[in-house]
């Protein structure tokens, strides 16, 4: 692709996150939004660009498309990625990559077959506290990692789980760890690697009437690398608004805590022979009106796609890492059946 050519994007699924993708594509001078697709008609997109009600109609059109951004419900991600790859388009897939490891493997296999990139949306990796933590771990400044504790306590009310919507269903949503907290599972995996010896307890405290799965859980495990152990405590039953998303790391040579509602601030740092640097400000959370999501770092994803296709850099969040996050959550959720 030429240096001055615009990368042409189409967005599949124009709910709140899809509209966010569309907005950031149009803001980037090196990108062009050429189409959108959703089963529902969109007032936001009406009359502005070509609009399709199925991905099949989109792909059968004669539009020149380089990249398909898959922002449809979780349970459709793998199907839509495969259709885009079969049409020999690059893919940007929102989290989670799929709802099973097996589905992820099919997408990876097809991407290799047609020599196309699949970019995962793991935007929390771009937040300054996450970048800082990655540097600490890679330089082994904390020493041996002894314990990691993640706490994610958010609010998702009846306005979020509207009747007839895909959210809250096992088939299209998949569960709280997939939809709300997979970014934090990804951050843990990115920093400390895979887990084993998983134990878990689940409860549905306040969402029995509008979801088919748990709203809260306590998960304990060990890390495959080293001798450290960890836990994830999560809930969407918090009263009125999101409370916090935190990660506490206890190492042999120091302890740190990333805190705030979205792991957007460093709350504690005490490391042997180390002076805490001043970090850049963290982008605010994605604001969806009645609720907020993770950090608004999607612009970095779009930039990485463009730079990769123009051979300026490589994929920063690849599909194999997305597969590992799904694999970890799938193994945790396998304990729901026991």
Image (cartoon, rainbow, N blue to C red):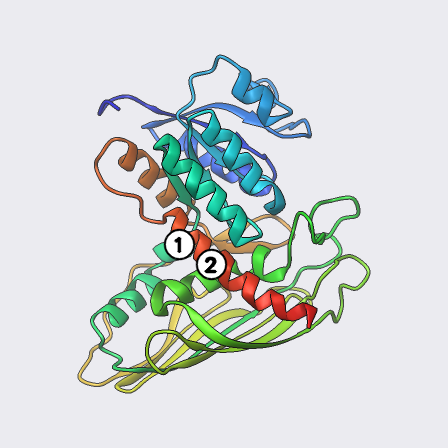
Q: Residue at x 31, y 68 (%)?
A: 133
The answer to whether 229 appears left or right of 214 in the picture is: left
Residue closer to the observer: 99 or 272: 99
Residue 161 versus residue 132 in the image, above or below: above
Residue 242 versus residue 304 in the image, above or below: below
Residue 140: x, y in percent?
Answer: 22, 75
Q: Which residue is mark 1?
A: 321
Residue 45 versus residue 94 in the image, above or below: above
How busy is the neighbourhood of tag 1: few (under 14 within 10 Å), some, or many (20 plus)? Answer: some
Say which element carries label 2.
helix
Residues at discs 2 and 1 in contact (Cβ within 8 Å): yes
Looking at the image, the residue that sits furthest to the right is 209
Q: Quadrant of the C terminus?
A: bottom right
Q: Which residue is mark 2?
A: 325
Q: Is residue 330 visible?
A: yes
Residue 331 versus residue 166 in the image, above or below: below
Residue closer to the observer: 135 or 97: 97
Report the Cα–Cα distance between label 2 and label 1. 6 Å
How busy is the neighbourhood of tag 2: few (under 14 within 10 Å), some, or many (20 plus)? Answer: many
Q: Is residue 45 visible?
A: no
């Amino acid at each position: 692709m030429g240096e001055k050519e615009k990368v042409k994007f189409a967005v599949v699924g124009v709910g709140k996150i899809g509209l966010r993708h569309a907005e950031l594509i149009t803001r980037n001078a090196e990108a062009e939004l050429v189409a959108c697709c959703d089963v529902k008609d969109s007032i936001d997109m009406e009359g502005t660009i070509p609009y399709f009600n199925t991905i099949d109609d989109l792909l059968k059109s004669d539009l020149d498309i380089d990249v398909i951004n898959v922002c449809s419900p979780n349970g459709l991600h793998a199907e839509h990625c495969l259709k885009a790859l079969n049409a020999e388009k690059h893919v940007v897939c929102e989290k989670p990559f799929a709802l099973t490891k097996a589905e992820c493997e099919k997408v990876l296999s097809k991407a290799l077959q047609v020599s196309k990139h699949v970019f995962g949306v793991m935007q929390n990796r771009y937040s300054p506290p996450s970048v800082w933590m990655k540097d600490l771990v890679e330089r082994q400044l904390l020493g041996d990692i002894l314990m990691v504790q993640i706490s994610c306590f958010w609010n998702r009310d009846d306005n979020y789980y509207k009747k007839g919507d895909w959210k809250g269903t096992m088939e299209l949503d998949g569960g709280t760890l997939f939809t709300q907290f997979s970014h934090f599972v990804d951050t843990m995996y990115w920093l400390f690697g895979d887990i084993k010896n998983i134990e878990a307890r689940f409860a549905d405290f306040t969402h029995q009437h509008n979801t088919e799965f748990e709203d809260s859980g306590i998960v304990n495990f060990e890390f495959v690398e080293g001798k450290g152990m960890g836990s994830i405590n999560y809930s969407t039953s918090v009263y009125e608004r999101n409370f916090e998303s935190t990660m506490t790391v206890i190492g042999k040579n120091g302890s740190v805590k990333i805190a705030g509602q979205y792991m957007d601030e460093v709350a504690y740092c005490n490391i042997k022979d180390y002076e805490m640097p001043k970090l850049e400000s963290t982008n605010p959370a994605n604001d969806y009106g009645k609720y907020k999501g993770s950090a608004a770092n999607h612009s970095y994803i779009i930039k990485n796609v463009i730079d990769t296709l123009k051979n300026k850099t490589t994929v920063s969040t690849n599909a194999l890492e997305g597969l590992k996050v799904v694999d970890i959550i799938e193994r945790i959720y396998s304990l729901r059946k026991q």
